[in-house]
Amino acid sequence: MKRMIAAMACAVSGCIYADVKTPLAYRAPTAVEAKAAGAADVEGTACNRAVLGLVAWGDGGYAAAVADAKARSGATELADVRADTTFFNVLFLYDKACTRVTAKAVR
């Protein structure tokens, strides 16, 4: 009986609540195209989180990370965008996946 309950619990992972957005793509101009050769680098992050694999939330998408970088820097556009994704997990109890973008700020 305990095995059946454990199997059912694993089968319904993420079924209670999940609202997660993941990175896709974003077309950004190069620094030369945007005339941002001497512009400062800015960073933006966006994260998804989950607890026990049952409840997940966050907007860890590429667009959210770009929007965060624009908001932090006051830039109207970003050039030469580079992205990294990091994952943090604690015994499948807590998961965190973040997308971090670094770019040149175009004002």
Image: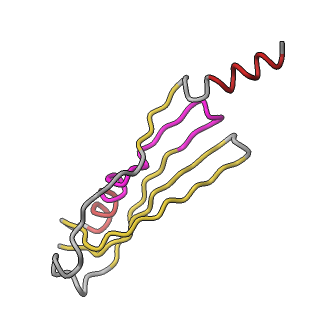
Image quarter for residue 66?
bottom left
Describe the colour scheme in one phrase.
Answer: secondary structure
Where does the C terminus fall, quadrant-wise? bottom left
Name the spot of residue 49 as percent of width and height, x first. 54, 43
Relative placement, left or right, of 52 versus 86 is right
Relative vertical location of residue 21 with respect to residue 16 in this rendering, above or below: below
Magenta span covers which residues?
49-66
Q: Above or below — where is 55 with respect to 73?
A: above
Picture mark count: 0
Q: Is residue 104 left or right of residue 100?
A: left
Name the residue located 43 percent from the left edge and 53 percent from the top edge: 46
Tell which residue pokes out farthest to the top in this image: 1
Q: Nearer the viewer, residue 75 or 80?
A: 80
Q: Position of residue 101 (x, y in %)?
A: 39, 65
Residue at horizontal 51%, vertical 27%? 17
Left of 38 or right of it: where is 87? right
Q: Position of residue 89 (x, y in %)?
A: 66, 50
Q: Quarter of the image for the N terminus: give it.
A: top right
Residue at x-position 29% and y-position 60%? 71
Residue drawn at 25 percent across, 82 percent down: 39
Does 41 lie within the magenta span?
no
Residue 55 belongs to magenta span: yes
Left or right side of 15 for 63: left
- Up/down of 27 relative to 40, above or below: above
Could you tell me residue 100's position as x and y percent? 44, 62
